[in-house]
Amino acid sequence: MKLNTEGIVIRENETGENDRVVTLLTKDAGVIRAFVRGAKTVRNRNMSGTQLFGYSRLSVYRGRDAYTVDDAQPIEVFFKLRENIEYLSLAQYFCELFAFFAPTEESADDYLSLLLNALYLLSNGKRPQPLIKAVTELRVLCLSGYMPDIVACGECGKFSDETMYFDCENGKLFCSECKGSGRAINMGVVTALRYICYSEPKKIFNFTLSDEGLKKLSELTETYMKVHAQRGFKTLDFYKSLLP
């Protein structure tokens, strides 16, 4: 069976002398692993389109036991990500995140669009890194069925308060009177959380927040992600080790 789709390489591994095994996030089949024969040969037409971060039009053949990339026509290869170690490490974290959360063997158009937008903004310095990180983490959780309940206080229904509290374990928001064991956040962060969850895909990165607010937002979405992934990510640990 042949699959014609678009996809991006989110992981690559060498195998044998000239071959490569890539993990692809594809528009029509979600996350799949595929062989690229002769990928390390200089004249191989699929070389650039099947390297890490390579976004391509793909022709993939599915055999009995595995996929094989027949053709990869590059659309974007995100070269700028390799010019900055922080950009590169954050991009690798995003890839690991999507490899974990994105579906396998089913449509993943929304996931692919989210990752591509995040990598584009990151590679071009269009938005602060904490903003891109927070949006990507929370939105991928929303796509995966972990959208938090943040319309109003989970107990009394109060929409806003000077300080509100977010319960990462249960994904609920509480006012100051019903706070329970949640993490304290101001209304700027609450508004950002709501915006990320409920805005249309093309607009989710289009907001501003103070540096301190972005720091708290990024810490919150990271904690929420780890709670529901029930694991850590080595690429995230490395990215954070680079920060001042």
Image: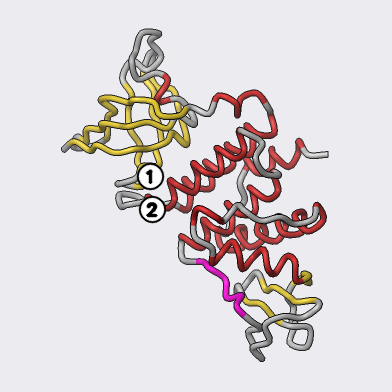
Asked if the stretch drawn in magenta spans residue 120, the answer is no
Residue 102's place in the image compared with 35, above or below, is: below
Q: Which residue is mark 1?
A: 31
Asked whether the beta carbons under mark 2 and mark 1 sit within 8 Å of each other, the answer is yes
Chain part drawn in magenta = 146-151
Q: Residue at x 78, y 70 (%)?
A: 186
Q: Secondary structure at mark 1?
A: strand
Q: How many numbered discs?
A: 2
Can you tell which quarter of the image residue 16 is in? top left
- Main structural element of the magenta stretch: helix, strand or loop? loop
Asked if the stretch drawn in magenta spans residue 150, the answer is yes
Residue 159's place in the image compared with 231, above or below, is: below
Q: Amino acid at mark 2?
A: Pro
Q: Secondary structure at mark 2?
A: loop
What mark, if any, has residue 103 been given in the picture? 2
Can you tell which quarter of the image residue 234 is in? top right
**Location of residue 1 in the rendering, given as x and y in whole percent from the top left corner:** 16, 38
**Location of residue 243 in the rendering, given as x and y in whole percent from the top left corner:** 78, 39
